[in-house]
Image (cartoon, grey):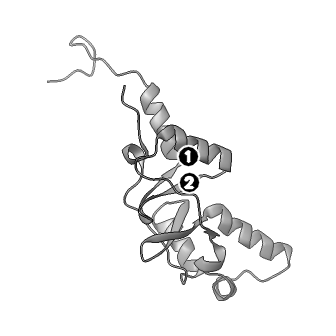
Amino acid sequence: MRKLLVKDIMTEKITVASTHHKFSQILDFFNLFNIRHLPVTDNDKVIGIISVRDMIKTMAECLQNNESITMASLDAKYNAGNLMTTSPIAVTPETSLEEALSLISDGGFHALPVTQDDIIKGIITEHDLLMAYHKEKQPPKHYEINQSGFGI
């Protein structure tokens, strides 16, 4: 069996943010594109990453400090530049899935940007790894002519 690499399961069509994107725009990205992790780039180079958890944590901190959390106040105070985790650990398309899994589990990450020569090429998440494991362990389906569901 062939050793699976990050490029075999990564998401290549990704949404990215720039440091100037406001809090509400980042929320829109998460909702519109049904994503949980958003790389932040500068000229296609990954400089950070934001997760839904980062957004929730930010709102929780505001509430704990008895700050107003209207969208206008959040937009005035937060942008991708000050919400992101800077210099995230990244992998290349040629990284093995075992290494990506180790990085995610040991580092407590939920996603890793995929880069080639520092340029964003995709993203790999725990969900991607779980689905790859499930697909690998799932026995192939065999069909026989006398089984229901068989069609020509």
Dividing the image into 4 quarters, which one contains the N terminus? top left
Residue 5 x %, y %: 41, 41
Residue 24 x %, y %: 58, 79
Give the amino acid type for the residue marked by disc 1 in the picture: Glu
Tell which residue pokes out farthest to the left in this image. 152
Q: Quadrant of residue 76?
A: bottom right
Tell which residue pokes out farthest to the front in this image. 117
| Mark 2 neighbour density, 10 Å: few (under 14) some (14–19) many (20 or more) | many
Tell which residue pokes out farthest to the top in this image. 146
Q: Secondary structure at mark 2?
A: strand
Give the amino acid type for the residue marked by disc 2 in the picture: Ala
Dividing the image into 4 quarters, which one contains the C terminus? top left
Residue bearing mark 1: 126
Q: CA distance from mark 2 to mark 1?
A: 6 Å
Residue bearing mark 2: 111
Question: Who is closer to the viewer here, 9 or 100?
Answer: 100
Question: Decide: marks 2, 1 in contact (CB < 8 A)?
Answer: yes
